[in-house]
C-alpha cells in the first residue's frame, strides 16, 4: 500500500471513538486526498472533543447511529474501522457484501511506516512499559552505536495515534507502539507485526469480546506469530519469564531462524537501577525490566539508561498521587481495569489501604482480587455493576474477613465514605479492577470525577 492509494477515493471512518484513533484516521485520509465521512453511533455532545480536533478538516459527519447507505453499493469505497467495532458487526457484513475495501488505522500505519516498530502488548503494565521504553530510547539519541535519529511514541496509549503524522516518520527513526488485542487481530488480517515485539503478561481480559481466555491469548500471540523473520533483518521477541503462558511462548519461539528471543523478570533489575526508579511495586520493576531489554537491544549506553530511569514519571491515572489530606494520601489508578492490575496497586504499598473498586462487568473472575483485598486492604468501597461480585469474592476468600466493605451509588458517595474510614497514614486507591462504561465515558472521565471529589474535601 502507498499513500496515493487513498487519493481521490471516498473513505468512511467507522467509529470516531474517545481515544484518538478515529480522529487520526480521518485526518490522515483528508491529508492523503480522500473524500472523508465519519460515522459513529454516539451523540455529538459525547464526541465534542474529538469533533473539535477535526474542525480544520473537510469531513462529513454522521453521528447518533450508522446509516446503511454508507455501507451500501453507493457508499464510500474504503472503510477504516475502529478496533472497538466487533468484526461481526452487521454494517461491516453489509460492506463485505458490497465488496468494500475494509481496513483499520493500525493496518494502514504498519503498511506505510518506514521506520522499525517496537510493539508492546499484554494484559497489564503495557502503557507504562511503552512509555518507559520510549523514554529510555530517547536517552540514547546521539550515542555511539545507536542507529536511530528520533523516537516516536504512540498506539493505544493516551491519544497518541501516529497515522496522520506518517509523512514525518523516516527510516532512521524508531516507533514505539502500545498494541491492544483488538489491534493485533486487525494486524493478523494482513500478517503484520512489529520487528521488536514484547508482551508484559497475560491474565483474563476483554472476555466480553473474546469469549475465552484462550481466544484472548491467541489474539495477543499475533504480535509474535507474524513478526518478519528474515535472517538479514531485525526480529526480537521479548517474553515475561514469570508468566506461565508467555514463558511457554518463549520456549516455542526460541531458536527459530531469524528471531532473537529474550526473557525478562522483575528480579533482573540491578539494585542500583531499582533504587533510582521512582515507581513503586513489583509490577513496576517488571515493567522496567521489560523496557531495559528493548533499550539494551538497541544499544542505549548503560550510563544513559541509569540517568533516564531516574527521571521517568508515572503516567496519568497509573498510581498517580492526587493529594494528601489530613495525613491520608489519595491515588488515582483508574487505568487499572483488570483484577491483576488492581492487585498490583494494592501490593505496591505497605501502609493501610482503602480501595475504591468496581465498574462495568467484562466477565472477568474476581477470585484473586477478592483474596488480595482480604489480605491487604483495610476497607473496600465498591461502586458499579460489579460491586456485588467483588464483595462475594472477598467473603469467599475469608468468610471472617475484618475488611470493612461498603456499597456506594456514586463517585461522590464513594469518596465521602473513603474519607470517613481513612485515618492519618492510610492510602486510598481508586483502582477499580473494572472498565468504566457503566457509569463513565472512559477511565479518564472516571479519574476526573474521582479527583474532583477528592479535592473538594479540602474546601
Image (cartoon, rainbow, N blue to C red):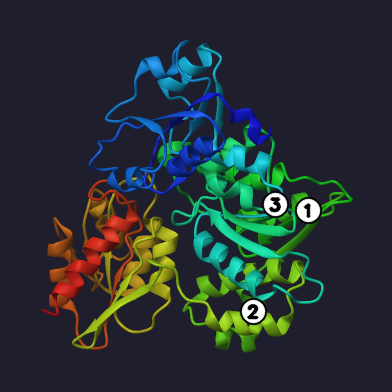
Q: Would residue 459 be found to the left or right of residue 305 on screen? A: left
In this view, the residue in front, 58 or 318, is 58
Residue at coordinates 33% horizontally, 84% vertically from top-left? 351
Residue 210 screen position, x and y as percent: 48, 37
- Packing grade of label 1 (10 A; few <14, some 14-19, many >=20) is many
Q: Which mark is residue 249?
A: 3
Do the CB atoms of the residues marked 1 and 2 lie less than 8 Å apart?
A: no
Residue designated by label 1: 235
Q: CA distance from mark 3 to mark 2?
A: 22 Å
Occupied quadrant, residue 449: bottom left
Which residue is found at the position 59% from the left and 73% from the top? 288
Residue 197 disc label: none
Q: Going by the image, does 118 lie left or right of 387?
A: right
Q: Nearer the viewer, mark 3 or mark 2?
A: 2
Q: Position of residue 222 (x, y in %)?
A: 65, 42
Given residues 113 and 413, the one toward you in this image is 113
The residue that disc 2 covers is: 269
Give the vertical position of 30 relative to 227 (above or below): above
Amino acid at each position: 500500500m502507498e499513500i496515493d492509494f487513498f487519493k481521490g477515493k471516498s473513505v468512511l471512518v467507522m467509529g470516531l471513538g474517545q481515544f484518538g484513533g478515529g480522529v487520526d484516521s480521518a485526518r490522515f485520509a483528508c491529508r492523503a486526498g480522500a473524500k472523508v465521512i465519519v460515522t459513529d453511533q454516539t451523540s455529538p455532545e459525547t464526541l465534542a472533543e474529538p469533533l473539535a480536533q477535526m474542525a480544520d478538516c473537510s469531513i462529513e459527519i454522521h453521528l447518533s447511529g450508522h446509516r446503511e447507505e454508507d455501507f451500501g453499493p453507493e457508499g464510500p469505497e474504503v472503510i477504516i474501522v475502529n478496533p472497538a467495532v466487533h468484526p461481526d458487526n452487521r454494517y461491516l457484513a453489509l460492506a463485505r457484501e458490497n465488496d468494500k475495501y475494509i481496513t483499520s488505522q493500525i493496518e494502514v500505519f504498519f503498511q506505510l511506516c518506514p521506520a522499525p516498530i517496537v510493539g508492546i502488548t499484554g494484559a497489564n503494565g503495557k502503557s507504562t512499559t511503552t512509555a518507559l521504553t520510549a523514554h529510555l530510547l530517547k536517552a540514547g539519541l546521539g550515542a555511539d552505536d545507536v542507529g536511530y535519529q528520533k523516537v516516536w511514541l504512540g498506539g493505544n496509549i493516551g491519544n497518541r495515534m501516529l497515522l496522520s503524522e506518517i509523512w514525518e516518520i523516516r527510516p532512521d527513526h524508531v516507533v514505539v507502539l502500545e498494541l491492544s488485542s483488538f489491534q493485533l487481530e486487525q494486524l493478523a488480517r494482513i500478517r503484520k507485526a512489529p520487528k521488536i515485539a514484547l508482551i508484559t503478561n497475560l491474565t483474563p481480559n476483554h472476555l466480553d469480546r473474546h469469549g475465552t481466555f484462550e481466544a484472548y491469548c491467541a489474539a495477543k500471540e499475533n504480535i509474535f506469530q507474524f513478526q518478519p523473520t528474515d535472517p538479514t533483518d531485525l526480529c526480537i521477541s521479548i517474553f515475561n519469564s514469570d508468566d506461565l503462558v508467555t514463558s511457554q511462548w518463549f520456549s516455542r519461539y526460541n531458536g527459530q531462524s531469524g528471531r532473537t528471543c529474550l526473557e525478562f523478570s522483575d528480579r533482573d533489575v540491578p539494585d542500583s537501577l531499582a533504587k533510582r526508579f521512582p515507581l513503586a511495586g513489583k509490577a513496576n520493576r517488571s515493567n522496567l525490566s521489560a523496557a531495559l531489554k528493548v533499550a539494551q537491544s538497541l544499544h542505549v549506553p548503560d550510563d544513559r539508561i541509569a540517568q533516564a530511569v531516574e527521571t521517568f514519571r508515572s503516567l496519568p491515572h497509573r498510581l498517580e498521587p492526587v493529594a494528601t489530606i489530613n495525613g491520608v494520601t489519595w491515588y488515582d489508578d483508574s487505568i487499572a481495569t483488570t483484577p491483576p492490575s488492581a492487585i498490583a496497586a494494592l501490593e505496591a504499598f505497605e501502609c493501610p489501604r482503602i480501595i475504591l473498586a468496581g465498574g462495568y462487568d467484562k466477565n472477568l473472575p474476581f477470585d484473586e482480587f477478592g483474596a488480595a483485598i482480604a489480605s491487604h486492604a483495610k476497607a473496600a468501597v465498591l461502586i458499579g455493576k460489579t460491586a456485588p461480585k467483588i464483595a462475594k469474592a472477598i467473603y469467599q476468600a475469608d468468610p471472617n474477613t475484618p475488611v470493612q466493605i461498603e456499597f456506594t451509588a456514586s463517585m461522590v458517595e464513594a469518596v465521602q465514605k473513603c474519607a470517613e474510614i481513612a485515618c492519618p497514614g492510610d492510602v486510598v486507591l481508586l483502582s477499580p479492577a473494572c472498565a468504566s462504561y457503566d457509569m463513565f465515558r472512559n477511565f479518564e472521565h472516571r479519574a476526573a470525577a474521582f479527583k474532583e471529589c477528592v479535592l473538594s474535601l479540602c474546601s
